[in-house]
Image (cartoon, grey):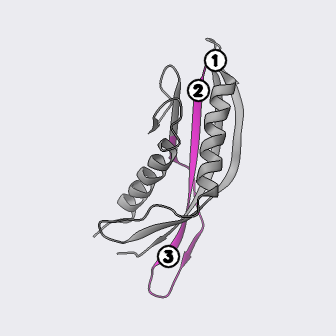
Amino acid sequence: MSSSISVINEVMDAVIALMNATTPFATVTRGALTTGNSLTAEVAPSSYNAVFMDKNSYIFLDVTMNGKHHSLKTLSEAMNKIHSTLTRAKSYTADTTNHRWQIVDITNKTLPQIIGREDNQDWLMASSLSVKFYWEGD
């Protein structure tokens, strides 16, 4: 059986795969931004759950996305494309192995915005998405 931690990781992996399916300028990875042009996504502080009598639940998983690129236009277009593609999708990823979770919806929390510029003139942007998924708890 899946623990809640591995379910969160599975959903994060699925969200990152959806992000990468938009073919941005760099592969979206988990963790901190690397040197050079890069995109990352990671779990952000999340709080709201709807729990049912059988202990199955809707979980709202907030995801922070960060990007860095020497071209502001390239960075902005990639991050905005990820946001628009994921929030406008009509169907989402599900756990095909154990059938224990299903992404139900993805919404914008904060749209991509400039957060700074590095000494080497690379632009930095950040944004966040809220991923709603149904989980059949352990």
Q: Secondary structure at mark 1?
A: loop
Residue 30 showing in the rendered view: no
Q: Which mark is residue 57?
A: 3
Q: In the image as oriented, which residue stretches furthest toward the top?
A: 120
Q: In the image shown, does 27 or 22 lie closer to the viewer? A: 22
Mark 3, Cα crowd under 10 Å, few <14 / some 14-19 / many 20+, is some
Q: Which residue is mark 1?
A: 118
User: What kind of residue is marked 1?
Assistant: Glu
Can you see residue 136? yes
The amino acid beneath tag 3 is Ser
The magenta segment: 41-69
Q: Which mark is residue 20?
A: none
Q: Residue at x 69, y 26 (%)?
A: 73
Q: Residue at x 71, y 45 (%)?
A: 111
Alpha-carbon neighbours of circle 2 within 10 Å: few (<14), some, or many (≥20)? many
Q: Quadrant of the image for the C terminus?
A: bottom left
Closer mark to the observer between disc 2 and disc 3: 2
